[in-house]
Image (cartoon, helix red, strand yellow):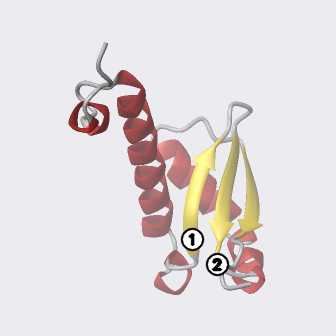
Amino acid sequence: MPPPKLEDLLNSSKNRELAKIVDRADQIGALTRAIQDALPADLADAVVAANVDAAGVLVVVARSPAFAARLRFEQASIVAAAKANGEAAKTLKVRVAHDAAE
């Protein structure tokens, strides 16, 4: 049996597993944008990514420790934005992005 064509592997309409990954990435991107839109402009760019785990913990990744501290003060609006985006967020956890240059 010949191996599958690369075109078929990369086509999310033909590859169910890839389609799941693409859908989840879209959900994470939409959640991140919803949170950024709910924040003041100076903080919006500090949000790298966001995700909600199965326990309802909203994890927001910040660009720096200073921004992480400021984002914690915005907990109510961040959780509300996640809920408005259809997520079952209950609590917020802010993490700091690892600097790839290190």
Residue visible at 44% across and 37% down in the picture:
21
Where residue 47 sits, quadrant-wise, is: bottom right
Residue 67 to residue 52: above or below: below
Which secondary structure, mark 2? Answer: loop
What kind of residue is marked 2?
Arg
Which secondary structure, mark 1? Answer: strand
Name the residue beneath numbered marker 2: 63
Q: In the rendered image, which quarter contains the C terminus?
A: bottom right
Residue visible at 66% across and 78% down in the picture:
100
Q: Residue furthest top?
A: 1
Q: Earlier in the sequence, mark 2 or mark 1?
A: 1
Residue 1 to residue 58: above or below: above
What kind of residue is marked 1?
Val
Name the residue beneath numbered marker 1: 47
Residue visible at 67% across and 85% down in the picture:
101
Residue 1 appears at what percent x and percent y? 31, 12
Residue 69 appears at what percent x and percent y? 77, 77
Q: Nearer the viewer, residue 68 or 73?
A: 68
Residue 78 to residue 96: above or below: above
Where residue 29 sits, quadrant-wise, is: bottom left
Q: CA distance from mark 2 to mark 1?
A: 6 Å
Q: Nearer the viewer, residue 102 or 33?
A: 102
Q: Nearer the viewer, residue 73 or 32?
A: 32
Residue 15 appears at what percent x and percent y? 32, 26
Residue visible at 29% across and 39% down in the picture:
10
Disc 2 + disc 1, Cβ < 8 Å: yes
